[in-house]
Image: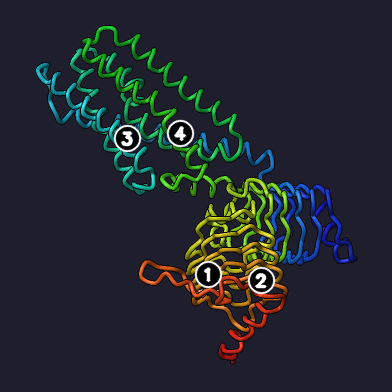
Amino acid sequence: MKASEVLRQYAEGRRDFRGENLRGLSFGSKDLSGADFSEADIKGTNFCRANLTGAKFVAAKGGLPKQWVINLLLICLLLLVILYFMVKILSILVVIIMFFLIPFSGDKISWIIMVDSIITVVFLVFNCLLVYRGISGFNSANIIAIAITIAIVSTITKFFAIANSDTIATTAIAIGFASAIAIAIGFASAIAIGFAIGFLIGIVFTIAIGIASTIASAFAFAHAINIAISGGFDSDVDSAFFFAKACIYLSIPLYSYFGWRAIKGDPRFSWIRTNAIDFSVTGGTSFLNANLTNADFTKATLKNTDFRKAILTHTCFKESKNLDLARTIKTYLNILQVQKLVVTRQGQDKDYSRLNLRRINLQRANLANASFINADLSKANLKNADLSGAKLVQTQLDKTDFTGANLTGAYIENWRITRATKFDNVRCKYVYMRMPTKDNPNQFRKPDNNKEVFADGEFGDFIKSIVDALPKAD
């Protein structure tokens, strides 16, 4: 079905488009409010700036069309190749410059091996720091600077070591197979591989593993050639090359692990995750700046989907799939903890303090004993939610809908309700007016008598007395 046909039928009054193939169509800035796209194929569909108020996407399939998956994989591999040759060319240029500017002699070989060993140690230590602190502990400029520095220094030392063999032909070949694929290339490529695999895991895990295996095989082949042509080298020089190659082989699974941890939400590798997801949504389903008020994505597949700047007022994501692989900048979904909450509706005993949860849909959610201290739940849908024992201390609750919610045992110290906050049919036996502290353990329970509970309708009267004391809006 073409986009023009969908729009024509919508204008004629049709709203049921369940199961339709809408892959790759464009509905940018169109009004499709109330339409039902349940179980439809919306991979690569463009809904940018569209009005989708009340639309249904139940069990819809979003993400990347197969062609875009292939295109992005090719782009990713191209970036790896470009990075490889950039560092290789840089290394060779440095070698040429050093060949003409700095003389060398045989007595320098021990010093060269020592420097090369130091470079190897620095490389390993840096990887240990990455494991401990994560990529986020370094900005991208620092990583690139370290990679280039290792590339230059490592290449220089290896060139001097090779040149000591007095074999010009061997030197030239070794520059191609050893210097360029030594620590420098291994390090720089590994950074890119980690990024690429972090991206690929979000699309097709099996292809990622295949690429990693292919790259590792290529390095092993290059190493075999290097060993074959370097038979005349001194044993200590050959050992230096061996350890450099070992660093490369270790880097492949290490940076693959970084990519995997990034996709799993490890904050230490958020830099990889953010960039990988931003890249992977290219060509995917787009709701950029769309109005998704009251839209329903129950059980929808949402990987590689763009929700940037979308209006998500009371949008339902219950049991949706792969929402963690969607691009969610400038929405409440940009926090992984919140993504999990809107999908599972299970937030009992969790801490959501100081989070911006405005307009979120948590209808029928289990939020027992959850903490929302200083959080913003204004205009949130909390209908029939279990908030028993929840901490609503200094929580922003303007126009929040508590209809049918359970507030028994909730802590409501200085909660910021307004006259527009809805408390229809709220279930509550008692509440606490204060959070207990060591200095003041008194919780100011209401009703005051611990043996009493609110009778039917009494909590409403209690809330009304609080609301009536609030200043009227202008």
Give amino acid for label 2.
Answer: Phe
Query: Do tag 2 and tag 3 residues touch (Cβ < 8 Å)?
Result: no
Q: Residue at x 56, y 88 (%)?
A: 470
Label 2 vs label 3, nearer the camera: 2
Upstream in the sequence, badge 4 or badge 3? 3
Label 4 vs label 2, nearer the camera: 2
In the rendered image, the vertical position of residue 19 relative to residue 429, given as above or below: above
Q: Which mark is residue 128?
A: 3
Q: Nearer the viewer, residue 421 or 299?
A: 421
Q: Which residue is mark 4?
A: 257
Name the element at disc 4: helix
Q: Which residue is mark 1?
A: 411
Give amino acid for label 4.
Answer: Tyr
Q: CA distance from mark 4 to mark 3?
A: 13 Å
Classify residue 225 as left or right of residue 281: left
Instruction: Bin the neighbour count of mark 2 within 10 Å (Cα to Cα): few under 14, some 14-19, many 20 and up.
Output: many
Name the element at disc 3: helix
Q: CA distance from mark 4 to mark 2?
A: 44 Å
Q: CA distance from mark 3 to mark 1?
A: 45 Å
Give amino acid for label 3.
Answer: Cys
Residue 191 lies in quadrant: top left
Label 3 vs label 1, nearer the camera: 1
Q: Which mark is residue 402?
A: 2
Q: Residue furthest front?
A: 451
Find residue 132 and report its horizontal and vertical position in percent. Answer: 34, 40
In the rendered image, the vertical position of residue 200 relative to residue 439, given as above or below: above
